[in-house]
Image (tube, helix red, strand yellow):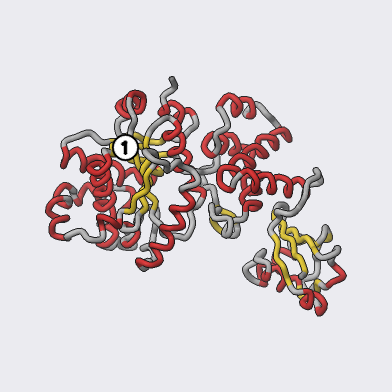
Amino acid sequence: MVNVFDILQERGFVKQTTHEEEIKELLGKEKVTFYTGYDPTADSLHIGHFLQLMAMAHLQRAGHRPIVLIGGGTTMVGDPTGKTDMRKMLSREEIKENSEKFKKQISKFLDFGEGKAIMVDNADWLLDLNYIWFLREIGRHFSVNRMLTAECFKTRMEKGLSFLEFNYMLMQSYDFLELFRRYNCVLQLGGDDQWSNIIAGADLIRRVEGKPAYGMTFTLLTTSEGKKMGKTEKGAIWLDPEKTSPYEFYQYWRNVDDKDVINCLKLLTFVPMEEIRELEKLEGAEINRAKEILAFEVTKIVHGEIEAKKADEAAKALFGKGGTATSIPSTEMDKEIFEKGISILDLLQEVGLTSSKSEGRRLIQQGGITVNGKKITDIDQLINLDWFEEKEIMIKKGKKVYHQVVIK
């Protein structure tokens, strides 16, 4: 029987471990309870979170028990990791709303049936903590000198690290201790930017309970050049279909760089390694086949097979391979607008393809906008009913972004 640690390592998840041999042995001989935490700082998870959910899914498939920790308490403080400025302070109501959305999204990726994965909120134990007790029982185990050497604090030292944020490491460590006591959770997982916080938590358990605890971090989702993936001109690639449509989501993965497609197949899909190794042999235009598989499989996991098929058909319709264009992002607009006519710059802003008129001007001057296949060269171009084929027009921005305008 293959050890899930070997699976994670082969697929490229594992970045750092506190005790590699011990973790591998533990995962190979017994059912291990492990956890990953998610601070609900936004109203949707993004693709970086998805990578960690995939790792959790692999572990659950191998028989281990996941705990998803929603950071309703830690979000009140804010993790300084990777930030040059203090995070925006959210109200308890905002955090609660975001938490509910996180819970709904995460439930699609893990089995929360009886005796399976569990979801908990650290607000349950953090919000009512006695501060003096916390300082005496938990704070005494932390060296300030050692904490200041942690990567998560280094980036903040120049601009100033608030005492509020300085507490974050203690709170995350205390989470691990609570989960250890409540559920016998012995392994914490997270992105590699969480390494300092994870080892602090494992160390706290060893000091307080005198028992072993472990940490493992995963590689961050980056391109072959080391740049973070999951960003577009519009912003992050979200898992919420209202924020990033299934079609846009599909297109993002369909258009990844040739050098990144195999890595993404390993990390973001359940495609067997034998098949991925065969796809790795493809060269030139044939690599598009691997990209199509990647886009379909990731979209299927996140949005379901029906949406993945719709996105696939829409993409093929645009590139002349048959299918239907029903899933291309579209905006309905009143017919009256086009009876009078609307300037191309206003239209681009209206449908969300540009954020300003200056951006629209620049795109048109660079030859980056077409309407129904015709390149727009005049920044004062008026779009009226003459442009419509039946009830719709297709706007293309750059080489890969399409948007349909439908009159009602």
Q: Secondary structure at mark 1?
A: strand
- Identified by mark 1, the residue type is Leu
Q: Quadrant of the N terminus?
A: top left
Whether residue 200 can be seen here: no
Residue drawn at x 26%, y 53% as measured from the top left: 171
Determine whether, in the image, residue 326 is placed left or right of residue 26.
Answer: right
Q: Residue furthest top?
A: 1
Q: Quadrant of the C terminus?
A: bottom right
Q: Residue furthest bottom?
A: 340
Residue drawn at x 68%, y 67% as measured from the top left: 351
Determine whether, in the image, residue 49 is placed left or right of residue 155.
Answer: right
Whether residue 19 can be seen here: yes
Q: x and y percent of residue 20 in the render?
A: 33, 29
Q: x and y percent of residue 388 in the render?
A: 84, 66
Q: x and y percent of residue 248 in the render?
A: 64, 53
Residue nearer the viewer, 192 or 115: 115
Residue placed under numbered mark 1 in the picture: 187
Rendered position, 96 above or below 408: above
